[in-house]
Image (tube, rainbow, N blue to C red):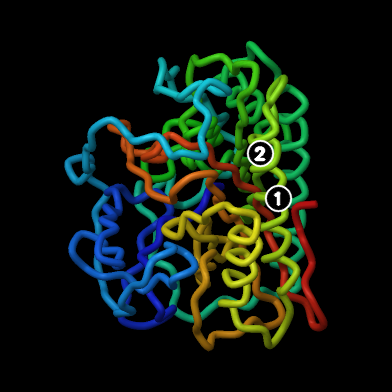
């Protein structure tokens, strides 16, 4: 599923309370005097990520899943590189009722208890049995994503995509992981055009020239598998095609550095380099995450340029899923409490793989 909502910090494991993937509350940026501030606290982003100088400072914040925390903003300003006539801005439409899950389908613990367990501090190392379970879940997620992609065309609603993903998961005795995760009402995330991530499927039909990210996660036999891809709808302009291509290359650049002994920060450094060299930006607040028996666990995979000393080791599993923007990386959360949209209305694109660190390299589990 789509990227975890993180607090920006140069410390990965200490002095920071990380936000969960769906916690609400916009990170409000003010770019002024060469510094980027997060609600009055200077962040640790590097110059290349915000194209301005900034103070590096460690900080700890905790935001609650409460709609009252949503920061409402006025009409977004259009970035000079965005051509609005080539694509439509997405506004939330009618959301259908929650899909039924048969009783025989095994549910994740958060569906049964209504709460998400805290991630363990040590990065879990999977046993061979756990690796095999993850491989099966990831293979199914990838297969469902491919079938959802085949259904994408002008006139299809995102709700219809959700229904397809839900049906395919159930037919394969899997639970669609996003459904009821902290109250999320659907079985898949569908993020169109200016929606950065966590888009809720609804009655809006896809239009000619749209780009759409479909983010599929399934829970099969006790393990989660997570992947996403951005698709072109009909005749997409060259700028949109380039954005999607660069987003794919950024994900692949991050995956390519993965192997034992390599620092996790090299993933973000490679992604930032690939994005900025092509003239695009990375939304830093949304990050990848460890995955396995839990939907989200350690490590947190930051997609922007930074430095830390934590290293990869065999039998670790995690996602790489950067969100790449054609404009500025600023965003806000809509009143539905989930949908993240770019402030300047520019488009974003995202690709995601689940990766297993092996003894001598890395294996992509969601091919």
Which residue has dot 2 on it?
230
223 w.r.t. 80: above or below:
below
Cβ–Cβ under 8 Å for marks 2 and 1: yes
Where does the image place residue 149, in percent across and percent down from the top left? 73, 30
Q: Is residue 340 visible?
A: no
Q: Locate residue 147: give its quadrant.
A: top right
Q: Nearer the viewer, residue 337 or 178?
A: 337
Label 2 vs 1, first from the N-terminus: 2
Nearest the eye: 187 or 302: 302
- Rendered location of residue 57, percent (x, y): 29, 79
Residue 98 as seen in the image, left or right of residue 240: left
Instruction: Reply above or below: 322 against 101.
Output: below
Q: Is residue 57 left or right of residue 257?
A: left
User: Where is 8 relative to 88, above or below?
Assistant: below
Q: Residue at x 74, y 79 (%)?
A: 259
Mark 2 crowdedness (10 Å alpha carbons): few <14, some 14-19, many ≥20:
many
Residue 353 visible, this angle = yes
Is residue 140 rendered to the left or right of residue 21? right
Give 321 or 328, whichever is nearer the viewer: 328
Checking the image for residue 221, the label placed there is none
Residue in the image at 57% along x and 69% along y? 268
Q: How far is mark 2 from mark 1, CA to CA? A: 8 Å
| Percent coordinates x, y for residue 108 in the rendering | 51, 49
At horizontal 59% and vertical 18% (from top left) the residue drawn is 206
Secondary structure category for the residue under label 2: strand
Q: Is residue 99 left or right of residue 36?
A: right
Label number found at residue 248: 1
Check the image and report above or below for 278 versus 271: above
Judged from this view, the residue extending furthest toward the top is: 155
Residue shown at the point (73%, 59%) measured from the top left:
252
> x, y (%) of residue 257?
72, 74
């Amino acid at each position: 599923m789509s990227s975890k909502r993180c607090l920006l910090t140069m410390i990965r494991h200490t002095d920071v309370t990380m936000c969960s993937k769906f916690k609400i509350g916009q990170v409000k940026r003010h770019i002024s005097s060469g510094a980027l501030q997060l609600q009055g606290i200077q962040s640790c982003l590097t110059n290349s990520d915000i194209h301005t100088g900034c103070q590096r400072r460690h900080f700890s914040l905790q935001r609650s899943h409460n709609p009252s925390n949503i920061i409402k903003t006025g009409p977004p300003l259009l970035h000079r590189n965005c051509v609005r006539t080539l694509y439509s801005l997405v506004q939330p439409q009618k959301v259908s009722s929650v899909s039924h899950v048969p009783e025989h389908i095994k549910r994740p613990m958060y569906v049964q208890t209504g709460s998400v367990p805290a991630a363990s501090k040590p990065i879990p190392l999977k046993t061979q049995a756990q690796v095999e379970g993850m491989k099966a879940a990831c293979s199914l997620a990838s297969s469902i994503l491919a079938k959802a992609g085949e259904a994408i065309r002008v006139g299809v609603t995102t709700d219809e995509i959700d229904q397809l993903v839900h049906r395919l998961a159930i037919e394969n005795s899997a639970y669609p992981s996003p459904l009821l995760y902290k109250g999320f009402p659907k079985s898949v995330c569908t993020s169109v055009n200016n929606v950065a991530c966590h888009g809720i499927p609804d009655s809006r039909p896809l239009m000619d020239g749209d780009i759409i990210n479909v983010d599929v996660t399934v829970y099969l036999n006790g393990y989660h598998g997570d992947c996403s891809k951005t698709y072109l709808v009909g005749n997409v302009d060259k700028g949109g095609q380039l954005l999607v291509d660069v987003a794919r290359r950024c994900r692949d650049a991050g995956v390519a550095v993965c192997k034992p002994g390599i620092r996790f920060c090299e993933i973000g450094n490679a992604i930032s380099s690939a994005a900025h060299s092509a003239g695009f930006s990375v939304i830093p607040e949304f990050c990848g995450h460890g995955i396995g028996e839990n939907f989200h666990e350690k490590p947190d995979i930051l997609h922007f340029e930074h430095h830390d000393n934590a290293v990869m080791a065999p039998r670790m599993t995690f996602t790489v899923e950067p969100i790449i923007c054609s404009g500025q990386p600023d965003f806000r959360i809509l009143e539905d409490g989930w949908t993240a949209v770019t402030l300047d209305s520019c488009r974003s694109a995202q690709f995601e793989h689940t990766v297993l660190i092996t003894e001598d390299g890395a294996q992509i589990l969601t091919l």
